[in-house]
Image (cartoon, helix red, strand yellow):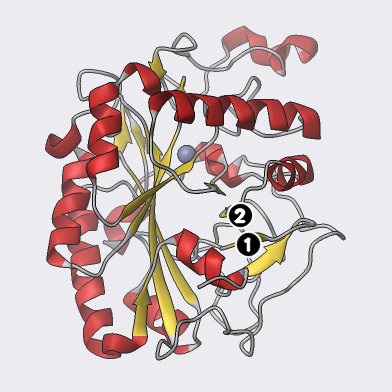
Amino acid sequence: MRDRATQTRQCECETMAASQPVGPRDRGVGSPGALHWLPAGKTAAVCFSVDDIHPATSQDSYEAGGDLAAGGLGRLSRLQMRHPYLKATLCVTPDWRLNSLVPRAGLLRHLPWVRRRAHWTRLRPSGHFRIDRYPEFVSYLNSLERCEIVLHGLSHAHAGPQIAVEFQDESEQECIGIVQRGLDIFHAARIRFVPGFVPPAWNAPPALIAALDRLEFQFLASARDVLTPVSPHAVANMSGLKAVSLIYPQMVGTHELVHLSCNFQATSSADRALQILSLGGVLHVKAHIFKSAGNYLMLDGLDELYCNYLDLLFTQLHRSFGSRLWWAHLSEVATRMRGGV
Ligand SMILES: [Zn+2]
């Protein structure tokens, strides 16, 4: 898996994402002693989240859930059938617009004023993949057992070279407007969702965190770091938020917004998972619903190969930790971290 994965291209939209420090208003750094969020009898947690789910089918540029059981969501369900304890957080984009994941602005990139204001890739018209126009897709998502749904941006698109980084230099009020539009579409679609947010391409600038606070979100998963060595005091230093705990949930923002870092993907070793769980952390496994879009490859795309790897990994974790392991939704960890049960 590692050899194969390293031959693929890293996700440009992720590596280009401007990472942000946590900022002076953030608090509640995770520590090995702060394990009050674990239920009685549990010593560590496993979470699994899948990004970029929207109604595109295999007849479109890439299948992102629209083929229902015949596509990526079917592979997820089969994985969950083999592991009846496995829960998944589905990160759904309400009005996906990226028709290609490869930036190509041509001459535009050489014009200083235009380069940041023009879209560097092909976009679908606004509303084309708006989920309230796909009732069968929404109904299917709502029917999935052991799956929760969170907001994954609004359109997953932005003008300028960072084509998939939806939140960049917007003001807090602009962030509120974008997130609220996504919530409005979720409500119109009658999709069942929980108050969490996974920002497109990981990036959560302070204005977005403030907006999520204002909108009373309960949790955020921004940082992704699959390289920093695991230790009790390790902090994320790759994509998205930096200086947040790599393996423990912690509070960010000014209210009760819980942050959970992603620390594992298809290119990670089983030893990394065992180290995180041995330290009483949250093993947060990431996948993307599609593997490829044209010549663009996702390292952690949920193809059969990654499913097979996760099948072996989850079997090993279950054998190693047994009932001590808490297979949880992100929202369940956040709820307990905030003092709920
Ligand atoms: Zn995404």
Q: Earlier in the sequence, mark 1 or mark 2?
A: 2
**Mark 1, secondary structure of its residue:** strand
The alpha-carbon separation of the residues under discs 1 and 2 comes to 6 Å
Side of 237 where 26 appears, left or right: right
Which label sits on residue 258?
A: 1
Q: Position of residue 179 (x, y in %)?
A: 62, 32
Q: Is residue 246 visible?
A: no
- Residue 226 position in % (x across, y down): 49, 64
Q: Residue at x 69, y 49 (%)?
A: 19
User: Does the rendering let one see residue 116?
Assistant: yes
Read off the residue under disc 2. Answer: 218
- Neighbour class for label 1 at 10 Å: few (<14), some, many (≥20)? many
**Marks 1,2: beta carbons within 8 A:** yes
Q: Quadrant of the N terminus?
A: bottom left
Disc 1 marks which amino acid? Val
Q: Residue at x 39, y 68 (%)?
A: 328
